[in-house]
Image (cartoon, rainbow, N blue to C red):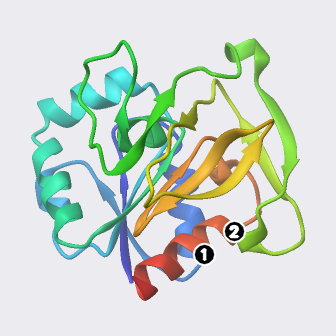
Amino acid sequence: MKVGVLALQGGVREHVQALMDCGAETVMVKGRQDLAGLDGLVIPGGESTTVGKLLVRFGLWEPIRQRAAAGMGIFGTCTGMILLAGALPGDHGPRLGLIECEVVRNAFGRQIDSFETELAIPVLGERPFPAVFIRAPYLVNPGRKVEVLATIDEKIVLARQGKFLACAFHPELTADLRLHRYFLDLLRLC
């Protein structure tokens, strides 16, 4: 299992370490050549407008879309969730559009409103997941193919569509590896 972590901004090292702790061969993706042979890609948190522009500037936008169409899975956390979504109302920036939904940015408030909570994620088992929310988005209007995996106050904070996993929070900032393992399992099963 070979998984890349988009290394343009955000919690890159933390995702790399989590994936390595799960036994995955891990590569930092900084250019088009780094996508070769990947089973999956993690798009970490950061600033979505900046990451979108950097993907275009470094020639990664279209290659990522092509690799996703060819079967590569993608796990997007926070900014990654925004980029995976089909639409961002009022925004015309680049979107990968791989999950049939809309996304609301900074939906839980500004940086000062960041929080941690114990989140019920049934696909991970009975034990709650320690979720860290930092200027987090959430999903709305999911399509028929979207499986909602976790919500807070009816706001979708974790969802999947096939091999694409969108997460509003930062699992890489905890010692809990269950969500990274879940993504690796998706890559094996789908």
- The residue depicted at 78 percent of the width and 40 percent of the height is 152
- The residue depicted at 67 percent of the width and 53 percent of the height is 171
Question: What residue is disc 1 on?
Answer: 181
**Type of residue at label 1?**
Arg
Left or right relative to 133: residue 183: left
Q: Where does residue 63 sit, x and y in percent of width and height?
A: 12, 53
Left or right relative to 83: residue 44: right
- The residue depicted at 23 percent of the width and 29 percent of the height is 94
Left or right relative to 19: residue 2: left
Question: What residue is disc 2 on?
Answer: 177
Left or right relative to 124: residue 71: left
Q: Where does residue 19 sit, x and y in percent of width and height?
A: 53, 69
Mark number for residue 163? Answer: none
Is the C terminus in the top left, top right, bottom left or bottom right quadrant?
bottom left
- The residue depicted at 76 percent of the width and 13 percent of the height is 112
**Type of residue at label 2?**
Leu
Reply above or below: 53 against 31: above
